[in-house]
Amino acid sequence: MATSVAHQAPGGPAALGSRIWSWVTTTDHKRIGILYGVTAFAFFLLGGLEALIIRLQLASSGNTVVSAEAYSQLFTMHGTTMVFLAIMPLSAAFFNFIIPLQIGARDVAFPRLNAFSYWVFLLGGLFLNASFLAGAAPNAGWFGYANLTSTQYSPGLNIDFWVLGLQVLGVASIAAGINFIVTIINLRAPGMTLMRMPVFTWMSLVTQFIIVTAFPVITVALVFLMFDRFFGTTFYSVAAGGDVLLWQHLFWLFGHPEVYILILPAMGIISDVIPTFSRKPLFGYAVVVYSGLLIGILGWGVWAHHMFQVGLGPIADSVFSATTMLIAIPTGVKIFNWIATMWGGKIKFTTSMLFAVGFIAMFIIGGLSGVMHASPPADLQQTDTYFVVAHFHYVLFGGAMLGIFAGIYFWWPKVTGRLLSERIGKLHFWLTIIGANLSFFPMHFIGLLGMPRRIYTYDPALGLDTMNLVATIGAFTMGLGALVFVVNVVWSRKRGTPAGNDPWGGATLEWAISSPPPVYNFSVIPEVRSRLPMWAEDGMTPVPETPPSPVHVPAGSYWPALAATGIIVMAIGAILKTLLITLGGVAVLVVSIYAWSFEPFEV
Amino acid sequence: MSHPATAHHTSTGLDSRKLAFWMFIGSECLLFGSLISTYLVYQGRSVQGPTPEEILNIPLTSISTFVLLMSSLAMVLALAAVIRGDRTWSRLWLLATALLGAGFLGFQAYEFVTFVHEGLTLQTNLFGSTFFVLTGTHGAHVFIGVVWLLTLLVRSLQGKLGSDKAMNVEIAGLYWHFVDVVWIVIFTVVYLLS
């Protein structure tokens, strides 16, 4: 029966088969959040492994760890994996688990659509990585410039895997984006006005709007590429009058907003972490919210700064240079707000707080080098060199990933009911931050001294051996940090201190309920009277331990997973160039959609 | 929590499915926006014919456009009939909407076949690539809409489309009108301004 009072998840040692089945059919946002987190972290380790092989190859000049072709596949899959299969879905793990708790909801607006997003993401990620098994991993870089991707220059399956895999992943992102927009707008507890929402939820909302609007653009770019490769159209064919810049425009129209898709959730996370551990409300809450909105809007007007080197002309260059510099303002505003929040606060340097502070420091460095290549003349010197690699690793690893780790340490006790070890956590933090700086800081100089990115080796005469070796040592230090984190996870599962409802003295709604939360989240939906309901006097109505009346909980459904299977079968049919398999996938998808629509399912 | 039969309370008072659908339409705007922009950017850049001027049949497409516009009218009447619980007219108008949509698809199929006979395929030139992908994507949307409408018709024939299910029809209507509006833009940009 789909109604539950107090118990959650099948109690006792249920058979393994039925336990797995309950995960396949789950529509509980918390379990889907865990699925997202575990899957994305596995992809993160895979992407990290690719990075380590890259660094091993570059540890000395003229190295032969991998061939030039394998190297191209590694850097392409490293970038693609980290962007689409690690950072985005790690953020999605937080969206899933945390947003409904922060707004006082029992689940997301469309639980089955949520499950569908996860299964599409998982299968899309596996599909993309199956290219390694076929010996044909994508090899044209994560932004796959035309006409490197044309059948003429890339006749193998490599780009086919990429063009199909990314379209599949786009479906998952758009579906999840719509789901979370509706959840945040429509399922807030009474009194949870927009300007009382936690900043993490706010930044997530902005992120979802960017996802919903940016992904169709790359979908169109990918559809053109797919038609060029499969059906002989001429979208990116110069000989037929086409323009390879079309790809660059469409890709970066998506690609730059994508940068904010990656960073805004992390900014939201630390906007919740820093006040908690400074024992002070966030300084200038409204300004932080508005600057996030402004970043979301301005993020649409800067894409051509990725294209200064193609010669767009002085007017375009000037405009995009100005908008790029402009977007530094709301970003800087946020940084001042975080610092002002800490100012005079009773700061407690937990592991989570260390990662949050690390985010600020690293993001400032990455932001400063970012403003440097907002200037076209400077950019022309830096583009396609390791300077750019240094820049975006400072913002994406030093920014997004450190923010995500801050969130993991912060919310882990809420998710599992047990704390992570602070001692192991601090070791994890220091290995990570030292490793990151050791690895990425020398890349600024390596780049300015002329080492191009994406070249599998370099000449000893350049004199870059030492700095490259240092970068490699740093990368392995980070890798060690990731292993220490895994140890911490295992430790926490076995010996972690029970967390209680609110181990950190948090201000927001998720800390009002038990850890892990019951399947229905809130026994009674609270009425919220403050932006900081747990800190304010009488900030919310109490949430009793046990529900006074039975709570309706949606049942599971296997149709979302089956619909996702249909989509991936379509992609497999396309890779195998077998129309029958693709049509089989369509059939599975259509049947699943109908069964899904007509099955009795009460939210 | 509320009883399953009663409508769910939402923070805004808007139905969640309807809101989700508006978001989907917003997303679709960017999809068609990108397709139409590409068509415009590549206009007149084909290195060989046939050109739009040589091949587009504006009078014929005007008729198919009119057919699609009338289907939107039928959609409005279908929704009104479902809301007032009028089974006969909801079935008739749903059928009319689906048939008019299918009629539009028939015109499009005829147009595509004619173009291929006159030497314009996906591979011929940039015009062929952009034209077929843009109008084909739109046609696929119409096709999905027709299947959706026929599904609603079957539900109505099964007696499962009472006025309590009006939201299902309203959302299908949103989709249908959106696809119609997109066609008006495509017709203007591709046919009238060529």
Image (cartoon, rainbow, N blue to C red):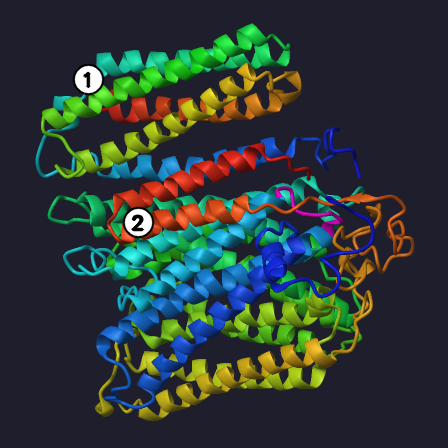
Q: Which residue does the numbered mark 1 point to in the structure image?
A: B57
- Which image quarter holds the N terminus of chain A? top right
Residues at marks 1 and 2, CA–CA distance in whole angstroms? 36 Å
Q: Regarding mark 2 in the picture, which secondary structure is present there?
A: helix
Q: Nearer the viewer, mark 1 or mark 2?
A: 2
Task: Considering the whole magenta stretch, tell me its main secondary structure.
Answer: loop
Other-residue count near label 2 (Cα within 10 Å), few / some / many at <14 / 14–19 / ≥20: some
Looking at the image, which is closer to me, A446 or A349? Answer: A349
Report x, y in % for residue A350.
Answer: 72, 78
Q: Could you tell me residue B54's position as x and y percent? A: 12, 23
Looking at this view, is A392 or A54 the one in front?
Answer: A54
- Chain at tag 1: B
From where the camera sits, is residue A522 visible? yes
Residue on which the image places disc 2: A573
Quarter assignment of residue B83 = top right
Q: Judge by depth and name the residue closer to the eye, A203 or A557.
A: A557
Image position of A567 (left or right of A544)? left
Q: Where, quadrant-wise, is the C terminus of chain A in this rendering?
A: top right
Q: Is residue A378 above or below residue A201?
A: below
Q: Residue at x 12, y 44 (%)?
A: A240
Q: Amino acid at mark 2?
A: Gly
Chain at numbered mark 2: A
Q: Cβ–Cβ below 8 Å for labels 1 and 2?
A: no
Q: Are marks 1 and 2 on the same chain?
A: no
Mark 1, residues whose alpha carbon is within 10 Å: few (<14), some, or many (≥20)?
few
Please name the amino acid that badge 1 sits on: Asn
Residue at 45%, 15% (x, y): give it. Answer: B72
Furthest residue toward front:
A15
Residue A480: image location, x then y, percent: 52, 86
Q: Residue A107: say if magenta.
A: yes
Rendered view: A88 above or below A404: above
Read off the magenta span: A102-110
